[in-house]
Image (spheres, rainbow, N blue to C red):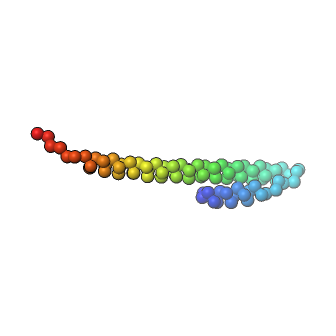
Amino acid sequence: MEAGSSEALAEKLASNSPPAAGSSGLISAAAVDATHARIAAAGMRCALRVQATAAKLTAAAARFTDNEAGSAARFLALPSSTVS
């Protein structure tokens, strides 16, 4: 489920008003709705953490690539020597 869909679902479920007291079926439905809202919110938090981790990994990969390019350039700049 996409993050936007989870958020929309959480908002929709959170906006539901609680059922009138006395009806066990409505009370059960309200409990299910509340659980669904909590699950959707947890899914949203998880999606945000995954996105943050992806951004950190992308930045780390860029730093690694830059480091490797710099190392290769320094290596190639070393004077060549011959072994006799």
Q: Which of 34 and 67 is in front in this view?
A: 67
Q: In this view, does 69 lie to the left or right of 81?
A: right
Q: Position of residue 77 (x, y in %)?
A: 26, 49
Q: Which quadrant, please, contains the C terminus? A: top left
Q: Position of residue 17 (x, y in %)?
A: 82, 56
Total residue callouts? 0
Q: Identify which residue is drawn at 38% across, 48% down.
A: 67
Query: Can you name the residue that lies furthest to the left here?
Result: 84
Q: Where is residue 22 in the image (x, y as percent from the top left)?
A: 88, 50
Report whether residue 32 is seen: no
Q: Identify which residue is drawn at 74% across, 56% down.
A: 13
Q: Position of residue 81 (x, y in %)?
A: 17, 44
Q: For residue 15, what is the image quadrant?
A: bottom right
Query: Can you name the residue that lies furthest to the right here?
Result: 22
Report whether residue 74 is seen: yes
Q: Identify which residue is drawn at 88% across, 51% down.
A: 21
Q: Which quadrant, please, contains the N terminus? A: bottom right
Q: In this view, does 61 lie to the left or right of 16?
A: left
Q: Identify which residue is drawn at 64% across, 52% down.
A: 44
Q: Nearer the viewer, residue 68 or 33?
A: 68
